[in-house]
Image (cartoon, grey):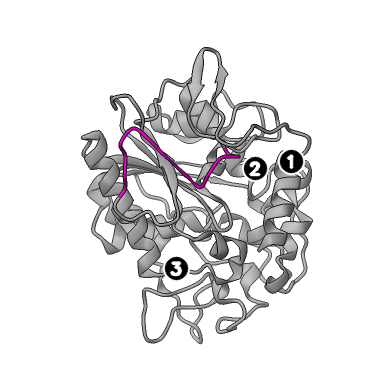
Amino acid sequence: MRKLWLAAVVVACGACGGMEPGLEVSQDAVTYAVSYTGSDFQFSGGFSPSNAPYGGFGGGSCVASRTPVVFVPGNGDPAKNWDYPPSTGVPSVYETFRNAGYNDCELFSINYLSESERSTGVTAYHTSDRAEIIADFIQDVKAYTGKSQVDVVSHSLGVTMALEGLRQFNLWSSARRFISIAAGMRGLASCYYAGYANPAVPVCGSANWFDPDVFGFYPSQWYAPNPRMANGGFRDDPSRATNTRFYALSAGYNDQVACTTSTYYTGCYNTNFFDSRTNVKAQLFVGEGSTAGQYDFDWSDWSPFALGAGDTDGVGHFRAKNNTGAIQVRMLSTTCTGTGCCSGYAATCQ
């Protein structure tokens, strides 16, 4: 997925400047300990997670007073990219949380894919081992901070991987709030062309016949069951976790991953949304700019990332994460509901 990553950098950053690897930068008298240009391993302050073979960030010389946040990145995106510069010049997600008063003992992220797996994203499907990395990390964050719960902010593949970790390891009581950004909880219509059992594109597979905890993003069909993507699957997790507050941010038809397809284009816009429940507090569209192309493509060359849709001139799959730090902070630090969670965000939010 090297092509994916380079394209993502171009469309998500544009002419933004960079930082020297590992450099701490100061803004408004706040020192930031995490850099998107630094190492994959940016743990500090004695925080040494038990199952983090591919790195992440978090920890410091501080004490957690707020509910700690666990950020879960998407396919091809390293944990440190929660510090990636937004296209609008506002602070990164990580910086936005720091500016809101969160310290480094309250902000954590985990890589559940290796660097090589991130560079070949067509192989990055759901497995128990990957879900376990996230589940173990949540437990380690709780132990390190002394808190009984965390807030989860997740993007793309990271959403369904985090939901899978919470489900498989019975950790819903550990999740106070959960934010889904640009996920595929109903499957990806863009996977129809690849097929449900294409060995070259397992990210688009249906559920494995021999191991139901191995599955991709093929929308569940009678001929290719994929229960996590079906009615009663991920989208209905709020009914199983009634004490957790759920939120979602979608780029809608501007999302090049969900909606670059001529097959079932209509309806692809809401694959990130949960079923309506009283504990689902806000599900918002933040997409802007170009819409995804209405044609099928070969997943093996990651063409939608090169095309970019909203990420070329507005907000698409990646910028739905990178640009929305203000909304994410509001969702976790207030009791906002609906479009009330848009307050402080200057772009489209409806």
187 relative to 244 in the view: left or right: right
Q: What residue appears at the point 58 percent right and 39 percent down from the top-left corner?
A: 36
Q: Confirm whether the magenta stretch covers residue 37.
A: yes
The residue at which mark 3 appears reads as 126
Q: What residue appears at the point 49 percent right and 17 percent down from the top-left corner?
A: 30
Label located before the other in sequence (2 or 1)? 1
- Of tags 2 and 1, the one toward the viewer is 2
Label located before the other in sequence (3 or 1)? 3
Label 2, label 1: how many angstroms apart (C-alpha)? Answer: 8 Å
256 relative to 279 in the view: left or right: right
Image quadrant in which you'd find residue 27: top right
Residue 284 visible (yes or no): no
Q: Which of 177/73 is in front?
A: 73
Residue 288 visible (yes or no): yes
230 relative to 267 in the view: left or right: left
The residue at which mark 1 appears reads as 314
The numbered dot on residue 66 is none
- Of tags 3 and 1, the one toward the viewer is 3
Image position, residue 241 (x, y; %): 28, 52
Kind of element beneath mark 3:
loop
Q: What residue appears at the point 21 percent right and 39 percent down from the top-left corner?
A: 148
Marks 2/1 in contact by CB < 8 Å: the verdict is yes
The residue at which mark 2 appears reads as 319
